Amino acid sequence: MENNECLFCSIDNDRIIESNHLAYVIRDGFPVTEGHSLIIPKRHAVDYFELTPEELNACTELLHSQKRSLTEADNTITGFNIGMNAGESAGQTIFHCHIHLIPRRNGDVENPRGGVRHLIPGKGYY
């Protein structure tokens, strides 16, 4: 795929809410919860496993910054899910690495125990 065909390589600058030298943040176009954000490396890398240590650090910096910003702006946020899909079988649909930062609130699901383990039905409760 050429970078001009990649959604995240050609993102509209108006959507970027924060950035650093190697990564940027946008709000998810199809949010799971209010404030659902994507941390995206600027360099085209298919998934997390292609990121350099410097890119990982840049993404982590933005994860922390967005956590602070979101919790300061919304005191109903009581937790976060952080997730990545690597590969089609894992649910990846845009093949440019992106990290989901999903704010969670008390009571947003009946029983949150197991968190991301619920990706496979029946495996979340243990």
Image: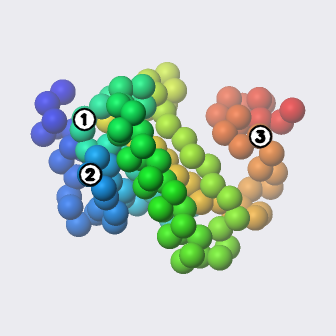
Q: State the mark number for residue 21.
A: 2
Q: Nearer the viewer, residue 34 or 67?
A: 67
Tell me the residue at 32%/35% (across/down): 96
Seen at 36% across and 26% down, the residue is 50
At horizontal 41% and vertical 39% (from top left) the residue drawn is 56
Q: Is residue 24 left or right of residue 80?
A: left
Count residues near mark 2 (Cα–Cα under 10 Å), then give few for <14, some for 14-19, many for 20+. Answer: few
Could you give the CA–CA distance between mark 1 and mark 3, rounded to whole angstroms?
A: 32 Å
- Residue 11 in percent (x, y) is at 22, 52
Q: Which mark is residue 44?
A: 1
Q: Which residue is mark 3?
A: 114
The image position of residue 33, as x and y in percent, is 56, 60
Circle 1 packing at 10 Å, graded few (<14), some (14-19), many (20+), is some
Type of amino acid under label 1 = His
Residue 111 as seen in the image, left or right of residue 55:
right
The mark lying in front, picked from 1 and 3, is: 1
Which colour assignment does the render follow? Answer: rainbow
Mark 3 residue crowding within 10 angstroms, few (<14) / some (14–19) / many (20+): few
